[in-house]
Amino acid sequence: MKAVPVVTIKKELIQLSKEELTELCLRLSKFKKENKELLTYLLFESHHEGDYIENIKRFIDEQFELINTNSYFYIKKSVRKILRLIKKFAKYSLKKETEVELLLYFCLKLKEFRPSIQHNVTLTNIFERQLLLIKKIVSTLHEDLQYDYNLVIDELTE
């Protein structure tokens, strides 16, 4: 089965009743965890972006505490997992400020992590790539936000 374009789906959705739309959303949420998470964000958390960011920061803290520090292999694996989850949560929001906040927090936690990431090239590269991505996103934001975020970036690069 071939998927139809979004425009066609939109035209079809406009013709449905409220009950039919509700039923479609519920059915869609049963198929994939990401669909359910996105619906949760849209219905309950999108109105309070600050709380959403704080909840994710707490989640990041928990994940960093769970990292097995016995070898850099496990550390790298866990750090990649955390980063993948952050990207997913930022994708739900579609706000660049949220993505920057989460990535900056990730970089801060990574920089403070013990054993130091400076002893591992892969972890250092992950850190530097995320800083480059943050700088790229920040350059598209309002000047006041750029200034504030660049101060944080400068602290991280010291």
Image (cartoon, rainbow, N blue to C red):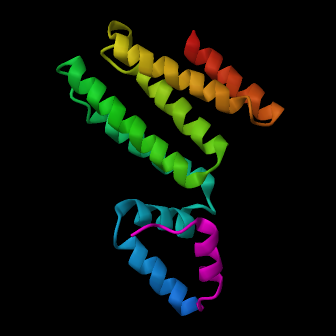
Identify the residue shown where x is 41% and y is 35%: 83
Q: Position of residue 25 (x, y in %)?
A: 47, 77
Q: Position of residue 47 (x, y in %)?
A: 63, 63
Identify the residue shown where x is 75% and y is 29%: 146
Badge count: 0
Identify the residue shown where x is 49% and y is 25%: 108
Furthest-left residue in this view: 70
Left or right of residue 139: residue 35? left
Q: Position of residue 45 (x, y in %)?
A: 55, 62
Query: Within the image, what quadrant is residue 73 found in?
Result: top left
Span colored in magenta: 1-17
Residue 13 drawn in magenta: yes
Identify the residue shown where x is 61% and y is 73%: 8
**Quarter holding the C terminus?**
top right
Query: Within the image, what quadrant is residue 9 found in?
Result: bottom right
Residue 101 drawn in magenta: no
**Quarter holding the N terminus?**
bottom left
